[in-house]
Amino acid sequence: MYFAMIKRSIKDLGHSKYVIRFGAEEFFASDTFECVCKRNAFPYDLWLEKIKQIIKERGIRKKKLIIELSKEVKDYL
């Protein structure tokens, strides 16, 4: 379940609606994301840095980073 939340939130970082993007950013900034990662042995620090980079970017570069992180998360399992 948590894995699906992370994948969906990564995709939401590139959503056209601000409210959805902001919700995803809030999730990654929350303690919940950190706890989920640490409980399930996900690479929290690595993913968080990539998420911060995605938030900073715009346009095609942002979409490319989202796709790359989505693949990495999917391949992690």
Image: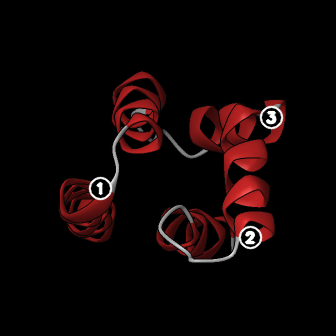
Q: Position of residue 10 (x, y in %)?
A: 49, 63
Separation of marks 3 and 2 at Cα, in angstroms:
15 Å
Pick the quarter of the image with the N terminus: bottom right
Residue 55 shown left or right of residue 12 in the figure: left
> Dot 1: within a 10 Å radius of its alpha carbon, few (fewer than 14), some, or many (20 or more) residues?
some
Q: Amino acid at mark 3?
A: Ser
Q: CA distance from mark 1 to mark 3?
A: 21 Å
The residue indicated by pointer 1 is: 62
Residue at horizontal 81 percent and vertical 41 percent from the top = 32
From the viewer's side, name the closer residue of 1 and 13: 13
Name the element at disc 1: helix
Q: Position of residue 17 (x, y in %)?
A: 69, 76
Earlier in the chain: of badge 1 and badge 3, it is 3
Counting from the top left corner in percent of width and height, residue 56 is at 42, 34
Q: Tell me the element at label 2.
A: helix
- State the image quarter where residue 15 is shown: bottom right
Distance in Å between CA atoms under marks 1 and 2:
16 Å
Q: Residues within 10 Å of mark 3 (few under 14, many from 20)?
A: few
Look at discs 1 and 3 and give the one toward the viewer.
1
Q: Which mark is residue 34?
A: none
- The residue identified by callout 2 is 20
Q: Earlier in the sequence, mark 1 or mark 2?
A: 2
